[in-house]
Image (spheres, rainbow, N blue to C red):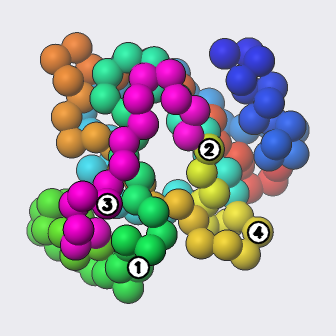
């Protein structure tokens, strides 16, 4: 983990970053969204991985619409459910956020189920002043 975080800091050119590691038992972010940072790293060590969508499969104009249920919003944002990709345990997902160098941020969400035992997840994110 230390080596992975060292690489993240170098790629992000960050002197410090926000870090979380532990068991997650529910979908923390069930709606497809873009993070409000420059860069985020997510690695799932156990359980279902983070879901992400290629840019061409996203209807970004629907992302700000308020829906009563995340599933309703997700169907509008990603009309073709077959386009949704999922990382596997051990994969390293490095995503640009909305503050990332003039490009569109990566659209992603937590898996709909954390599995029977939850997920063990490492998340590192840049912070505003790094």
Look at the image and give the residue range highlighted in magenta.
Answer: 78-93
Q: Is residue 2 in sight in this rendering?
A: yes
Cα distance between the residues tagged 4 and 2: 15 Å
Res 94 → quadrant: top right
Left or right: 27 as drawn, with respect to 75 = right
Q: Position of residue 4 (x, y in %)?
A: 71, 23
Left or right: 29 as drawn, with respect to 18 = left
Magenta stretch containing residue 87, yes or no? yes
Task: Please rate how many residues cluster around mark 4, counting C-alpha atoms within 10 Å: few if below 14, some from 14 to 19, many from 20.
Answer: few
Task: Identify the residue under disc 1.
Answer: 60
**Image depth: mark 3 or mark 1 in front:** 3
Relative vertical location of residue 40 with respect to residue 92 in this rendering, above or below: below
Earlier sequence position, callout 3 versus callout 4: 3
Cα distance between the residues tagged 3 and 1: 15 Å
**Image depth: mark 2 or mark 3 in front:** 3
- Kindly state the secondary structure of the residue where label 1 is placed: helix
Task: Identify the residue under disc 4.
Answer: 101
Q: Position of residue 83 (x, y in %)?
A: 31, 60
- Kindly state the secondary structure of the residue where label 3 is placed: helix
- Labels 3 and 4 touching (C-beta < 8 A): no
Cα distance between the residues tagged 1 and 4: 18 Å
Cα distance between the residues tagged 2 and 1: 20 Å
The dot on residue 73 is: none
């Amino acid at each position: 983990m230390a080596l992975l975080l060292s690489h993240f800091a170098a790629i992000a050119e960050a002197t410090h970053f926000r870090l979380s590691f532990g068991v997650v038992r529910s979908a923390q972010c069930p709606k497809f969204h873009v993070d409000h940072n420059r860069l985020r790293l997510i690695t799932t060590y156990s359980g279902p991985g983070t879901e992400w969508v290629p840019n061409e499969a996203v209807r970004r104009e629907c992302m700000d619409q308020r829906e009563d249920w995340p599933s309703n919003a997700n169907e509008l944002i990603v009309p073709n459910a077959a386009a949704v990709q999922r990382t596997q345990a051990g994969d390293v997902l490095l995503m640009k956020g909305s503050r990332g160098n003039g490009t569109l941020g990566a659209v992603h969400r937590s898996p709909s189920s954390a599995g029977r035992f939850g997920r063990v997840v490492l998340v590192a994110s840049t912070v505003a002043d790094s």
